[in-house]
Image (cartoon, rainbow, N blue to C red):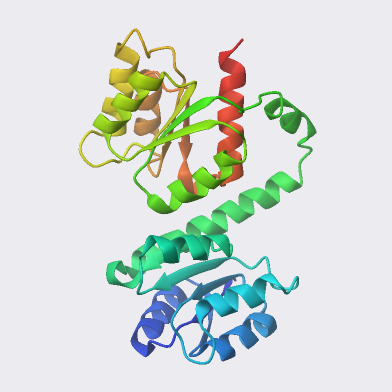
Amino acid sequence: MKKILIIEDDVFLGDVLTEKLAKDGFEIIIARDGKEGFEKIKSSKADLILLDIIMPNMNGYEILEAKQKDPSIANIPVIIISNSGQPVEIHRALALGVKDYLVKAQFDPEEVLTKIKSLFIKNENLSSLDSLDDAMKEKKVKTVNLEGKKIVWVEDDQFLNDIIARKLSKTGCVFFNATKGEEALKIINREIPDIIMLDIILSGMDGFEILRRIKSDLLTRRIPVILLSNLGQTSDVEKGKSLGAARFVVKATVTPNEIINQIKEVLDANKK
């Protein structure tokens, strides 16, 4: 049974989360202030922490900073649940290693549950990979240097955009981000990138229509496209492939590092 520590001084929200997660089979530990929460991080051996930012005695940022300095607890994943959704707050939390960031004004217990399950799935997939011999796989993806490569990322999830932007910035690639279809097509036609990462669910024009237009244009049809989506039904995968996608990746099953490896592998295959 997975153990979740909730550090939240809002009694109502804490109780809602406790009830929802306990019903789904998780063991719940709750702390009502920051100092108590940090002590329970060290003593509970939780698998995941749900952390508020504004709390008495010790705020969420202080907890994250102290947690980073303690090797025995530094790797426990954290999801922030905060009243603030300001970019500066999100960036600060990301820099301190949080896995996700939820805004209370948009709070949905079912969404929290979905994100928690997705996070555990990712961690289990990583554990399985660690038990395999990945030497050949690593050798393969390292044959492609992303330095100078043009990559267009079409995605309206700001949290994911921030994570991937940080990862890609370290590779030396030229990175363009669009959140809407028309904007994406303008960038693609102007830059003619080496590869496109394309979400499916977007406001206005969806990813399938963007992909259809890319592959219908002689100027862009040869650019490899990886579909990256929360959708994972067989019909969606088949539709993506029929429209010319090089790969179809389900977000909940991959880490940011694996996404970068997917980009390298597709570029490697495309040059042959």
The answer to whether residue 46 is visible is no
- Judge from the rendering whether residue 90 lies leftward or rightward of residue 12; answer left or right: right
**Vertical placement of residue 246 versus 112, above or below:** above
Q: Quadrant of residue 18?
A: bottom left
On-image quarter of the N terminus:
bottom right
Q: Position of residue 168 (x, y in %)?
A: 56, 39
161 and 147: which one is in front? 147
Residue occupying the point 61% across, 84% down: 38
**Vertical placement of residue 198 versus 257, above or below:** above
Q: Position of residue 253 (x, y in %)?
A: 52, 46
Q: Position of residue 246 (x, y in %)?
A: 47, 22
170 and 11: which one is in front? 170
On-image quarter of the C terminus:
top right
Residue occupying the point 43% across, 75% down: 23
Q: Position of residue 198 (x, y in %)?
A: 39, 33
Q: Quadrant of residue 205?
A: top left
**Vertical placement of residue 93 versus 271, above or below:** below
**Vertical placement of residue 231 versus 194, above or below:** below
The answer to whether residue 208 is visible is yes
- Judge from the rendering whether residue 164 lies leftward or rightward of residue 67; answer left or right: left
- Judge from the rendering whether residue 63 lies leftward or rightward of residue 235; answer left or right: right
- Judge from the rendering whether residue 86 lies leftward or rightward of residue 119; answer left or right: left
